[in-house]
Amino acid sequence: MAFLQLVPLALSASILGLLALLFRRRKPLSFLQGPPVSSWLLGHEYELTNQREVGDLEFKWFQDYGTVFRGAGCCGEETLMVSDVDALHHILNTGGYRYPKTKDDERSSEQITGRGLAWAQGATHKRHRKALNPAFTESQLRTFVPLFQMYADKLALRWRERFADSQIIDVSKWLQNTTLDVLGESTFGFHFEALDDKASDFQISIQKIFANSRQPFKLMTLWRTWKRLLPDPVVDYIASAYVTEEDVRFKSFLELAKGSARDSLARKGLNADGEKRSNNQSNMRGVEGKKDILNMLLRSMEDPKKRLDEDEVLSQVSTMLFAGYELTAMTLTWILYELSRNLNDQRRLRGEIDAILAEKGKNAMLTANDYDSMPFLNACVKEGLRLRPGVQFTTREADLDDVIPLAQPVISTSGEMLKKIPVIKGQRVHISIAAYNRSPSIWGSDSDQWNPSRFLRLESTKQQSSIGVFGNVLSFGSGVRGCIGWRFAVIEMQAILVGLLSQFEFQIPPAGLDIHAVPLKTMNVPMVRGELDKGLQMPLVVKRRSIS
Ligand code: HEM
Ligand SMILES: *[C@@H]1O[C@H](CO)[C@@H](O)[C@H](O)[C@H]1NC(C)=O
Ligand SMILES: *[C@@H]1O[C@H](CO)[C@@H](O)[C@H](O)[C@H]1NC(C)=O
């Protein structure tokens, strides 16, 4: 977007800012400590979205002020910054739908993924979740294991075909192609064939979706706040008058995704409108056979309480692809990175894998039970998620006056010890997944270090999870809006790690590797220092193991 085009937007934003100042003078969190604020207009928002490395600011702030503190939003708004386990549990779990996503997040979800699960709120969300849940049960996901293994083998085969016995490979791009192929097939029976060098428009679109979204400039930071604070018609007007490059990319992604979903339904001889479909019994046969997520969804819609309209059905496909493919690839990338830096752990994990393969026989296929019976594999997956969460934070808003309990009391500005935080309706809450995952009070003094064995210890002492869906880490969120695909992602990661580590060794290149955890929107993306413009990268030495 040309700079000049921004001037009118800047002017209108400033005028609106003044209006907001006149109407909003509440300081509901003034009793809480918090870092100094240098800009009334931008608060900490701009600094937070422009951190050099994930957690640069927050980790220290949580250390200085405790597990909750007062952060500054734009235009004098106050944000409750949270990493306290009881507070998180209250907001995400006990709270149910009382802490919905904020309006700006709802809008951007709709823009990128359409009217699917990530966008829906309240009763609509409940209906979507009910319709989708049958596709994400443990028994259903176990049927995907052979699919995950097939793609892990295909990736290994490509490496053997294309590369020397020992070569530096950017594993992140390959993992992206793998998880995209996996998700296309399991979500809606679509063959991206990314591992076969077939670059679909759709893939090009999804891979470029955040092309220039790193370090948004100041006006964009403000715009996020306006989307929440201004009346909808004003936001609609500004959004239609000032279309950014990002808006264009989001739109084309969504159109391509819905288009592919529509084609896929047509191939199955179905219509996304549940009514017509269920009246036509001969159509049902197409659904019975295949078991991808879209089919499961259509089947569950026979129950009127779970009925979705056509647009909602199509939007689930873009939602799953968007929410599932890159995060899984990134988490796997981080795990391979940590295993390359910690070769003892890599050897130990490979030992566990070799042992189970020896026990099962060379050509036997492992099952989900086998994966679950591998303690060190699961410890590494959990530790990777904990230390390197793909989503670094999420945001909520109280829809009632409430009191939030704390596990760790904090000291107020007047020196009082606070065990509860009163909040007012509309209070914006920043949920720091990355900071919770590194809380010393939960994880001990080595919370900043990679140490998968901590999970073996935790399990043996039965110190059970108090939040999250997996291993007491918050990386999949928690509660009614926790990640619906967490089990999918875990089984997929287990299968790919076992497939790769049984065939290859991974090392940091001899010249060294300076990886940065770069914040990109809410994500935590591994990039190479000095080459941030190249986006996601992880060049590791990949060495073939001799097959005995
Ligand atoms: C390692 C990989 C993954 C990570 C780290 C991850 C993380 C998350 C997180 C943190 C949330 C909650 C966001 C919030 O509370 O605002 C979430 C939601 C979601 N995830 Fe995942 N996810 C992963 C894989 C997947 C996969 C494979 C799928 C689909 C097959 C998926 C589909 C979704 C959907 C649809 C939501 C929205 C749920 C709702 O709002 O009810 N995710 N994910
Ligand atoms: C990923 O897939 C695309 C499309 O098939 C291809 O152009 C690209 O080279 C692939 N990347 C890697 C690293 O295989
Ligand atoms: C049901 O679907 C089949 C195949 O798609 C079609 O040939 C048939 O005409 C449909 N019947 C009704 C009653 O809609």
Image (cartoon, rainbow, N blue to C red):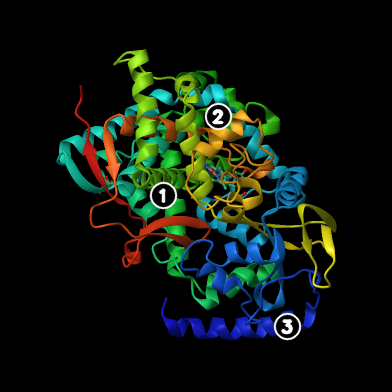
Using residue 177 as the reference point, say whether residue 327 is left or right of it: right
Residue that badge 1 annotates: 256
x 45%, y 23%: residue: 290
Picture quarter containing residue 534?
A: bottom left
Residue 496 in view of the camera: no
Label 2–label 1 contact, CB within 8 A: no
Using residue 399 as the reference point, say whether residue 501 is left or right of it: left
Using residue 301 as the reference point, say whether residue 355 is left or right of it: left
Residue that badge 3 annotates: 19
In whole angstroms, how far apart are the C-alphas of marks 3 and 1?
40 Å
What is the crowding at mark 3: few (fewer than 14 residues within 10 Å), some, or many (at least 20)?
few
In whole angstroms, how far apart are the C-alphas of marks 2 and 3?
48 Å
User: Where is residue 296 drawn, in percent x and y?
Assistant: 54, 27
User: Where is residue 306 drawn, in percent x and y?
Assistant: 66, 33
| Chain-order first, disc 2 or disc 1 | 2
Label 3–label 1 contact, CB within 8 A: no
Answer yes or no: disc 1 within 8 Å of ligand 2: no
x 66%, y 37%: residue: 465
Q: Which mark is residue 437?
A: none
Picture quarter containing residue 154?
A: top left
Quarter of the rendering occupied by the C terminus: top left
User: Where is residue 15 drawn, in percent x and y?
Assistant: 66, 85
What is the crowding at mark 2: few (fewer than 14 residues within 10 Å), some, or many (at least 20)?
many
Residue that badge 2 annotates: 135
Query: In the depicted view, which residue is nearer to us: 196 or 70?
Result: 70
User: Which kind of residue does numbered mark 1 sit on?
Assistant: Leu
Judge depth for marks 2 and 1 and give the one in front: 2
Residue 455 position (above or below residue 111):
above
Judge depth for marks 3 and 1 and give the one in front: 3
